Image: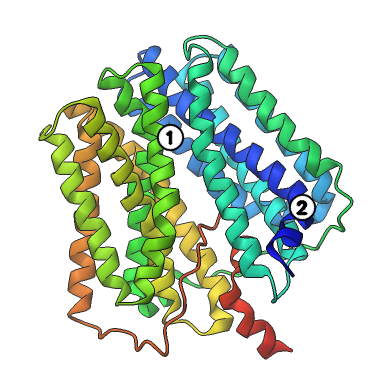
Amino acid sequence: MTLRSTVIGISALLTGAGALHMGMSLQGTLVGVRAGIENFPAILIGLIMSGYYAGFVAGSVYAPKIVNKVGHIRTFSAFASLASAAALCHSVFVDPVSWLVFRALAGFCFAVLSLVTESWLNERSSNLNRGTVLAVYFMVVLMSAALGQIFLIFASPAGYDLFILISVIISIALVPIALTSMPTPAVSEPHRMSLAKLYKTSPVGVVGCCGAGLVSGSYGALGAVFAQAKGLATTEIAIFMFLLVAGGAVAQWPLGRLSDRMDRRYVLVGLTITATILGVAVWVDVLQGILWLYTFGALMGAMLLSMYGVAIAHANDFLEPHEFVPASASLLLIYGLGAILGPIIAAAIMGWIGPNGLFIYLAVFSGIVALFTIYRMTQRSVVPSDDSTDFVLAQGISPVAFELDPRAEADDEASA
């Protein structure tokens, strides 16, 4: 099947997923900026932003039960409406407690909506095209998330117009999904590998995924808060956040392919040490000026947002084909737990030290992952090239996404 025919076949899903990620991405940035305008304390901003990831983790657990009970289209319609309403409620009830609830609701909805979309993608793919489907899907959602940041310049964050825009974008995501005529697949509850077994199998994979959640979750959640505190105007904040997300989107594939050609732990160490250096550089203001801030912001995004994919690929090198999906589901959960804690810790440091505290936090935790990985390299030899798997761009949004990974085909063939 050609790339063109594959894309046409999933165009409705791609349109809905792209609009959803665009709206949710803009909402995360807008909430951070508006919280700063409202003078919320830094620690409360961290709690609000981490509430999104708490809702996301809960949604990942309960989504299969909801979908199997009421069906794909009803589930997507209901939770897209809830997500749209939650966006509007931010402009009506402007206080930290309400926003914490709304952010958690948005995270829960996003997890459910992603599972619906990705289970449909899984149904539409086969062993012949699932790699293409996965690559096209993640390219669309990552670039949609980056482009969502640009909408911040359309209106003042101090008003309610942008919250209305977010609600409209999320509502538009509902249209192509609700009108699709594709058959709805059954969604099985994901089996997760025990954390003890997973850590025994790949300590670096577990620590790398947890570290990725701690740093990339904090950077994505508080990057706009940092930029605002540094005195950037709204348009400049939008550019900074666009470069943050786009840097991660562009860098993942070449860095992942590089990890196919050497010990992936070298790549992970390179990512984390570079992030540590960048964090220290921003902390001490070694190079001042907005262009340098943009450059460091994009480079930091490239390093931090690539950690998760490389860590998962390293863990997969030690797994049997039938263990890939349950292990990846557990690693996604570990990532989510790290993303819950990260914004709270980072915000507390920012409240204590100032906005540069975010980059101090990123430098410290990236350095911890680097040191642990270097230590493990002295305890375990490199995986032989014949036994390693190829890197696949698989930033799993729900556990179902990992079933699209062509590296899981061996399990399907073995079962057949």
Q: Is residue 34 left or right of residue 282?
A: right
Q: Which residue is mark 2?
A: 67
Q: Is residue 108 left or right of residue 70?
A: left
Mark 2 or 1: in front is 1
Residue 345 visible in the displayed image? yes
Q: Secondary structure at mark 2?
A: helix
Q: Place residue 208 in its image quadrant.
A: bottom left
Q: Which residue occupies 78% across, 57% down?
A: 9
Residue 108: where, in percent of width, then height?
Answer: 61, 42
Residue 128: where, in percent of width, then height?
Answer: 70, 75
| Label 2, label 1: how far apart the Cα atoms are | 33 Å
Dot label at residue 25: none
Q: Report crowding for label 1: few under 14, some 14 to 19, many 20 or more residues within 10 A (C-alpha).
A: many
Residue 346: where, in percent of width, then height?
Answer: 28, 37
What amino acid is at disc 1? Phe
Q: Which residue is mark 1?
A: 242
| Quadrant housing the N terminus | bottom right
